[in-house]
Image (cartoon, rainbow, N blue to C red):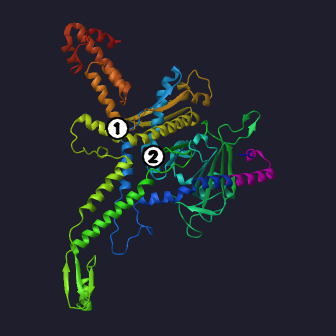
Amino acid sequence: MSDLPPLLDSLEEEERLRAESFIVSFLESLASEADLAKSERYAEWERNLDFVEGKQWNASNERPAGLARVTINSLWRLIRQEAALLTDAKPTVKVIARNSKLFAAANTLNKLVQAVFQREHVDLLIVRVVFDLAIFGVSFVKVYWDPAESGGQGEIKIRRIDPRTILVDDVYRLEEAQYIGHFTDVPLVDVRRRFPARGHLVQASTRPGVLKGGVGQAPGVKYRGTRNTTVGSSAIARADLYEWWIRDPSLEGDELRYPRGRLITVSGGVVLQDTSSPYILQWPGPWVKFSLPSPQDTAWPPPAISHLVDIQHYLNLAVSNILDQVRFVTQGVWISDADALMPESRKKLMTPIPPATLIEKAPGKELRWERLGDVSPTALALMNNLNQFLDFVYGMMDVSYGRVPRGVVAGAALEQLQLTAQSIVRLNAREIERGLTEIGQRVLGLILQFYPEERVEALLGPGGDLETIEFRRSELFEGFDEDVEELYYQFKFVVRPDSTLSMSREKEYAAAMALYGAGLLDRRAALELIDIPNKEQVFERLKEMEQMEAMAALSGGGVEAMETASGGPRPRGRGVEVLKKLIK
């Protein structure tokens, strides 16, 4: 990548015009390069979208008129089931401080990040991510600060971005990309509202909703997600807006001039914005990418359902053929001489839906009805096998749907089957947990950078209780003089591995209870082993309970008095020494 001119606002008018023309031309070449890198996926994505939406019959697989065209949309069912498995359990998240003096601040920041996740409905966003991974192989999320939200107080926004609108360097890891572009079709009034200094120079696009191969170049591939309109067909003036994040290699002395990247926004050949990244976040700034594993180092790996489309087609064909057989068997066939019926009688015979099958033969004035036999059991078996094969290839077993396989009665065997059924889904769960970690880290950075001295957020607890979280900057970070960027690196947002899978959570609960029942763990250790809401409050109540038990045991009441005080039996054989440890 060659050096770009300095920020346009730093140049004189004549020099600015030349620099602006160079930047627009440069971005056009990036757009063409990025569009070429993913162009081979366009037809595949459109086919996948059609199949998921149930549009599975077209000119390439059309059946003759009169034959059944049935759609058994198993792909839609499989993706929804995977999304349900991956969002069934709320992930366990935590903000960790690198300095012990910031533990209290980390606890507050943890609640603030969760409050933002709730407000932005990240659980529903993950459902969209699962669909993107299945259909496109990738998903993009943007975490950014919108200063216009909440009456000008600003809010952190988390948005899923359509992969088809992304123009990115063709590398697998987004951190290695040299540029990230985002194309949107927006009302012209929004362009002029967001960019008052130069928005008036932008004219309405003549072909809104068309993704171009480059800025201002001839239109290329249409994509769903915006309006595919033509000139005069919309009363609303719209514009094509391109937002580019560039790793500009320009130097200032021995240092990079834009260490966190450069942000350039263009519409209709007009550079609306040219600035260094407004965030303390390191490259790739506000962008988070989810991606399926790929055998090649490419930004656009093969989608999950691409290899299932043909199986889905043959399943539809098998079901359609079975229905045709049922219709022919039950309806039978009429055998008639060509002149055995009057035209009006012939018309009545052919009127039912579906129309009767009539076979004409040589004259003899004969008319009879023949039954064609039974539906082939092989066809029925083929339909069932194809449907089960789809489940198998995608990684969904009976236990994934809550069904107990025939012959499996032991709890341990069923548990092992459930874990095995999640083995394929677990790969996607790990990717989603990694992406959630990046989203949380970006939210954390935006809180530290943009929240004012005091701010209040609300967090809805598991029991439906609304908790108020107060952010007081001076109190939270008292004694730390680091600037915001240095303070940001004092905290780390983490997601507990496999916490998005409910089966993994239940296994942890079962293990903790088994160890507690065997006397190998006390109650506090058992609670530490599993994740429960409001853990600190539970520990406080547990401490009071332990003190009551210890007092009852030491006063001579023995184990029975201890159990009465604690409200239930405990594992035997630990004695007073354990109680003394509990008091500590």
The mark that comes first in sequence, 1 or 2, is 2
Magenta residue check for 374 = no
Magenta residue check for 18 = yes
Real-space CA distance between mark 1 and mark 2, rounded to the nearest whole angstrom: 18 Å
**Res 457 visible:** no
Q: Secondary structure at mark 2?
A: helix
In the image, residue 433 above or below residue 574: below
**In the drawing, does residue 584 fall left or right of residue 7?**
left
Q: Nearer the viewer, residue 255 or 6?
A: 255
Q: Give the dominant element type of the magenta stretch: helix, strand or loop.
A: helix
Residue 217 drawn at (x, y percent): 66, 61
Residue at figure coordinates x 35%, y 30% from the top left: 532
Residue 207 drawn at (x, y percent): 60, 65
Q: Which mark is residue 199?
A: none
The residue indicated by pointer 1 is 502
In the image, residue 397 above or below residue 556: below
Quadrant in the picture for residue 375: bottom left
Circle 2: is it few (<14), some (14-19), or many (20+) Cα within 10 Å?
some
Q: Evaluate if marks 1 and 2 touch, with contact meaning CB atoms under 8 Å apart.
A: no
Quadrant in the picture for residue 10: top right
Residues in magenta, as a range: 5-27
Residue 345 drawn at (x, y percent): 23, 88
Quadrant in the picture for residue 480: top right
In the image, residue 580 above or below residue 86: above
The residue indicated by pointer 2 is 125
In the image, residue 323 above or below residue 107: below
Q: What amino acid is at disc 2? A: Leu
